[in-house]
């Protein structure tokens, strides 16, 4: 993943500024969209919001958020059908 931060350096030969690292808008927007979604999850579920927990696989709130996202994804995938495996 490329850096989402823009850095500039002074080129002494030409006297103008150049980009040292390419600005990646897609990575930048993904991180902030994920932060907003995680904040909303913590707000509605009553969890403690800590932005440092974003993408940390050992944080309990992030683990719960990932499980909740998978649950929502699977629920949308089967169109909300309720499967009853018990047969009479």
Image (tube, rainbow, N blue to C red):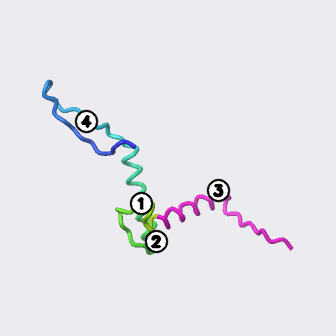
Discs 2/4, front: 4
The CA distance from mark 2 to mark 3 is: 23 Å
The CA distance from mark 1 to mark 2 is: 20 Å
Would you say residue 68 sits in the magenta stretch? yes
Residue 13 in picture, x, y percent from top left: 14, 24
Is 13 on the left or on the right of 59, as rendered?
left
Please state which of residues 82 and 48 is positioned toward the viewer in this rendering.
Answer: 48
* Residue that numbered label 4 is attached to: 20
* Residue that numbered label 3 is attached to: 77
Boundaries of the magenta span: 63-88
The CA distance from mark 4 to mark 3 is: 43 Å
Q: Residue at x 44, y 64 (%)?
A: 58
* Residue that numbered label 1 is attached to: 56
Please tell me whether mark 4 sits on a helix, a strand or a loop: strand
How many C-alpha atoms fall within 10 Å of the one at disc 4: few (<14), some, or many (≥20)? few
Please state which of residues 45 and 86 is positioned toward the viewer in this rendering.
Answer: 86
The CA distance from mark 2 to mark 4 is: 41 Å
């Amino acid at each position: 993943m490329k850096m989402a931060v823009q850095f500039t350096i002074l080129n002494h030969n030409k006297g103008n500024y150049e980009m040292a690292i390419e600005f990646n808008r897609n990575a930048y927007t993904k991180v902030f969209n994920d932060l907003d979604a995680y904040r909303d999850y913590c707000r509605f579920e009553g969890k403690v919001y800590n932005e440092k927990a974003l993408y940390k696989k050992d944080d309990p709130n992030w683990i719960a958020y990932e499980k909740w996202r998978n649950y929502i994804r699977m629920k949308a995938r089967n169109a909300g059908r309720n499967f009853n495996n018990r047969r009479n």
